[in-house]
Amino acid sequence: MTPIFTDVFTEIAVLLLLAAIIGAIGVRLRQPLIVAFIAVGILVGPSALGWVTANDQVDLLAQMGIALLLFVVGLKLDLHIIRTMGPVALATGLGQVFFTSVVGYVIAVTLGMDSITSLYVAVALTFSSTIIIVKLLSDKREVDTLHGRIAIGFLIIQDIVVILVMIGLTALGEASNSTSLGREAIEVLVKGGLFLAAIGLLMRYALTPLLHQLARSTELLVLFAVAWAVTLGAVGVHLGFSKEVGAFLAGVSLASTPFREAIGARLVGLRDFLLLFFFIDLGAGLELAKLGDQIWPAILLSLFVLIGNPLIVMSIMGFMGYRKRTGFLAGLTVAQISEFSLILGALGLSLGHINTDTMSLITLVGLITISVSTYMILYSHPIYELISPFLSMFERKQTDREDAHDLNVESGDYDVILFGLGRFGTGIARELQKRGFRVLGVDFDPDLVHRYKEDGTTLHYGDAEDPEFLSSLPLGQVRWIISSVRERHVNLALLHSLREQGFKGQVAATAHSLLDATQLKAAGADHVMLPYNDAAAEAVLDLFG
């Protein structure tokens, strides 16, 4: 096909313009941007217009976006969080990989595939897209929730497993004798250990002093952060791991420094811009003409991924002592296959283990599950409320593991229950305590709960949107419920649950805009706080009396 554009710059400009237009249409129709951007890729790819000829440039930008995404995720995970989430992440990640592989293999064999093909298909079904899930959780501001951290933990376990699988397959394809695979495994372990040791030494002795010097210039600090993410990503590739693992470890290495928030805040826009090219590249790589013969097997396998994978995660987390709501929200994050599944299929194709029909099947399952699971995750809370009565089998009577993230509510009376202990909520709590009110704090950030526990403050881990959690609080003792959370849907869910619980006291909620304030008032809030408006009024009062 003759290129329609004369230069790469023009092609990229048209891609961006088309993405902006289709993205705007998607937002107008209340569709997730991820689906809109994948649709852009399909539209400009070989299945439709065939406009993408700058494949190398688009792929490079996509890989930069992936590296920055995993880097920002690493920034949010300091070491004590990794330690606390390690057991559930390891058990859930490995358990889901094992059970999905076994069931997927049985389904593939039932569909008439041979053993090698069935094995590839089964393994491809086990891996979920860390990139897409982290983007969705970030958009919903759920990265710091308990289910968000658990999900990111077991997704990283999955990524490590798939990297080991691909290394093993490559070694198996190249090995001339039985000892080559063993040597390859030993080399990976040695390289990985040295890589981690080197990063640990840099964290201990070099990175914090270096960042103190670089922080004198914001531009230089951001430049170093990007360079560090990409460099460790490249080192990860050369050591036989992946750029995702390297970039993630780069973020973790800076997570304990005092500059992580500043770096993360300044990289969000660049990360989202570059990730646009990942989704376009993903869509452009789909050749729909080759997928028709695989539609029915793909639908069957997709249903297993969309329903079976979440059920497996919920079962494991329920057995470990987590509440059904946490298990459900975390389980939805594995309801799709990942870009690694497509890479694994491409590797099998190059090694001659599978044919193009199998690759087309894996691709179609990826397209279906990524699209559908995006909606499932975006609307996870309404879906949970709808099916919650049927999920009790996935919860033990004693949710001891999840309760370990909580501070037990001491016996005694409270005057106020305060949801959200961020900057605004902490200020409210401080002022209330000065006036002699006894405050019980509630927040969904386990890290925050841990810090407050060390300070001796009464703080309970919990989610304002969880009606079952509300029933465990001493609602009959308090006169006030205050929410410093500014997300409208969270406050509306809280007001609805309080009404269902028959709460008789006063409720104050926080709004981001006058429109939100009107809706909260209509939903039953006795008082609505507008932080910026209230602060402005207070400032004028202080200045002019």
Image (cartoon, grey):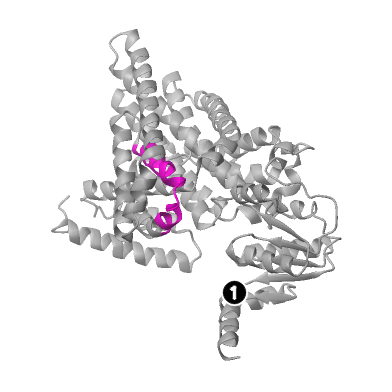
Which sits in the foreground, 282 or 227?
A: 227
Q: Is residue 298 left or right of residue 43?
A: right
Residue 216 lies in quadrant: bottom left
Give the SS element for disc 1: helix
Q: Residue at x 48, y 33 (%)?
A: 158
**Image quadrant in which the C terminus is located:** bottom right
At 67% from the left edge and 54% from the top edge, which residue is drawn? 463
The single residue placed furthest to the bottom in the displayed view is 544
Task: Report whether residue 105 is seen.
Answer: yes
Observer-nearest of 11 and 64? 64
Position in image of residue 340 (x %, y %): 40, 36
Work out whether residue 531 or residue 269 is closer to the camera in this orientation and state it: 531
Q: What amino acid type is highlighted by mark number 1?
A: Pro
Left or right: residue 453 versus residue 177 is right
Q: Magenta-highlighted stretch: main secondary structure? A: helix
For the residue pair 423 and 465, the one nearer the viewer reads as: 423
From the image, tell me which residue sits under label 1.
531
Is residue 335 among the parts visible in the rendering?
no
Q: Residue 466, how many percent across, how many down? A: 71, 54
Q: Is residue 259 magenta?
A: yes
User: Magenta region: which residues?
Assistant: 243-265
- Residue 146 lies, with reference to residue 154, above or below; the image says below
Q: Is residue 508 above or below residue 419?
A: below
Whether residue 368 sits left or right of residue 267 in the image: it is right
* Residue 77 is a magenta residue: no
Q: Position of residue 101 (x, y in %)?
A: 52, 27
Few, some or many C-alpha atoms within 10 Å of disc 1 (few <14, some 14-19, many ≥20)? some
Residue 27 rendering spot, x and y as whole percentages: 46, 66
